[in-house]
Amino acid sequence: MAAVTPTNKGADVTSHPDWCAPDRCGHLVPPLMAEMTRSHRGAMHRIGSARAGGMVVAYLVGVDARTPLIAVHATCRAGIGWAELSPAQVVRLVDCLSGLVIEAGGDPGSRDD
């Protein structure tokens, strides 16, 4: 019978940032693909309809002790694209989108569809 020797290595304990969603966290649920990094993931925000013109999904993603990135996925009939943007890049994107809403004659603060 083989002898079992105890190790001094304790179990890894992961602390989760406040924005981390336990039902989506990469440390708690398996990644979609084996090569994906185990990252914290925040709540998912969806805009649009996948069946109509397309949909945009955004959420926070990050590794311990680093500023999280904002993951943005866009889907349409032609395909899927995604990016992980820094907070500064997201601010620029929001400014550009707000400018387009104003050019189209809309109110960027409006919640109307």
Image (spheres, helix red, strand yellow):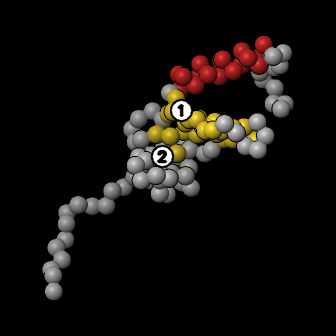
Name the residue tied to disc 2: 40
Residue at 58%, 25% (x, y): give it: 90
The reply, left or right, for residue 111 in relation to residue 19 is right
Question: Cβ–Cβ below 8 Å for labels 2 and 1?
Answer: no
Disc assigned to residue 83: 1
Q: Amino acid at mark 1?
A: Ala
- Residue 42 rendering spot, x and y as whole percentages: 56, 44
Q: Is residue 52 visible?
A: yes
Q: Secondary structure at mark 2?
A: strand
- Residue 96 rendering spot, x and y as whole percentages: 66, 17
Residue at 77%, 19% (x, y): give it: 101
Q: Quadrant of residue 103?
A: top right
In the picture, the quarter occupied by the N terminus is bottom left
Q: Amino acid at mark 2?
A: His
Disc assigned to residue 49: none
Q: Quadrant of residue 3?
A: bottom left
The reply, left or right, for residue 77 in relation to residue 89 is right
Residue at 63%, 38% (x, y): give it: 79
Outermost residue, top side: 103
Residue at 16%, 73% (x, y): give it: 5
